[in-house]
Amino acid sequence: MTNPAEVLGLPKPAWAADEVGMLYDMATRFMAEEIAPRYDEFEKNEMVDRESWLKAGAAGLLCASMPEKYGGSGGTFAHESAIIEAIGHVGVDGFGIGLHNSIVAPYILHYGSEEQKEKWLPKLATGELIGAIAMTEPGAGSDLQGVKTRAEKDGNHYKINGSKTFITNGQLANLIIVVTKTDPEKGAKGTSLIVVETDEVEGFERGRNLDKIGLKANDTSELFFNDVRVPTSNLLGHEEGKGFVQLMQQLPQERLQIGTGAIAMIERALAITIDYVKERKAFGKAIIDFQNTQFKLAELKTEATIGRVFYNDCVARHIAGGLDPVTASMAKYWLSDLQGKVVDECLQLHGGYGYMNEYPIARMYRDARVQRIYGGTNEIMKLLIGRSL
């Protein structure tokens, strides 16, 4: 198959050179050899098994951007990008490493106490702990200020009550960062992040592994907290009420990561479609020989190239500490919109076969749709960009 990483013919950016490139190659081999052969099984079971998480940890693919002193690899977001791109290029998009690595772990690194970092990060790096972040509730999605889950002090513990939904890694996660209200009267300033180790508490329940349109191999769940008691030392940050600020500070990386998955799938969709139209014949000639096919692919490759250059610039800015929330919102919304367009057009070029589940483009069509919803809907992204004008 045409190499998705090379389909655009662009030189590697400075941030993707040397050890980042080697990590991409290693991650690609791991995903192709360890995950892809079992991916249909994972889709059927609606989760990637815990053994695969432990294998990923042993291979150095968990917490690549965490400091070595906490069990990580001492890398940057460039290393996380390499891993997420490998997942997208191989086509095992339901493996929830991205959230674990570049969303959950950074909250602990940036806001956790030294004791918390020493306790949790090494186990996240091995896969002994699988991370999730519980933001969304049945009545609060993109509007995080509407969270109702409550954490009340009870001596030297918090007592947590509430429910969450659409939680990625929800069936397997045993370390969950819960967005709670420690003071409902203060609105956003009454929001706190509290870590729940599910293996050590009572009153925690997992609901359904939700039946989604796509990303079937990723366990996405309802979670219930019924008088769940955790030590007050599980609060992230030195004081209550900092949760909303912490969320806002970390959302740019989350949104950039969604862009990572988008550009990786865009490149894979183009690669497999170019191969297909060269092999498939109609009216006595290869589909690639029709002018319409050439024009469509010319448009898609041009837009994908623009997207990749923009994405590369965002990563370079982020590594340098200069990716602002507005630009991250642009990356999330524009790249995920482009992802939907490219995959749709590529499916069309497959004709009727594109609608068959045995063809990879069909799975991509299903998996791509949620990208415009999670991490804040694209409508919310436009609202945030509009406020900056």
Image: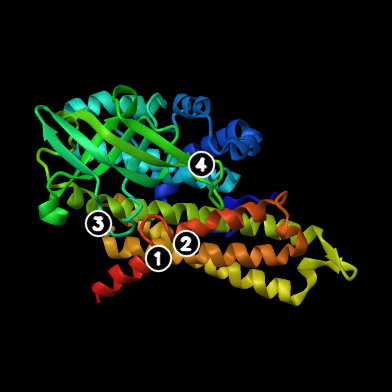
**Are discs 3 and 1 less than 8 Å apart at CB?**
no
CA gap, disc 2 and disc 4? 19 Å
Residue 296 place in picture, x, y as percent: 66, 72
Which residue matches tag 1?
378
**Residue indicated by mark 3:** 146
First of labels 2, 1 by sequence position: 2
Observer-nearest residue: 135 or 262? 135
Give me the C-alpha separation between circle 1 and circle 4. 22 Å
Residue 104 appears at what percent x and percent y?
32, 40
Q: Amino acid at mark 2?
A: Ser
Q: Earlier in the sequence, mark 2 or mark 4?
A: 4
Give amino acid for label 1: Asn
Q: Amino acid at mark 3?
A: Gly
**What distance separates the C-alpha of mark 3 from that of mark 2?**
25 Å
Question: In this rendering, which labeled residue sits more in front, label 2 or label 4?
Answer: 4
Mark 1 element type: helix
The residue shown at (40%, 51%) is 257
In space, the residues marked 2 and 1 are separated at their CA atoms by 8 Å
> Quick one: label 4 or label 3, which is nearer the N terminus?
3
Residue 121, relative to residue 261: is it above or below?
Answer: above
In this rendering, is residue 125 above or below 285? above
Disc number lying in front (3 or 1) = 3
Q: Which residue is mark 2?
A: 336
Nearer to us: label 2 or label 1:
1
14 shown above or below 124: below
Which color scheme does this rendered protein use?
Answer: rainbow
Q: Are marks 3 and 2 in contact (CB under 8 Å)?
A: no
**Can see residue 113?**
no
Q: Nearer the viewer, residue 316 or 210?
A: 210
Drawn side of residue 339 relative to residue 232, left or right:
right
State if disc 1 and disc 2 touch (CB < 8 Å): yes
Question: Closer to the camera, 329 or 167?
Answer: 167
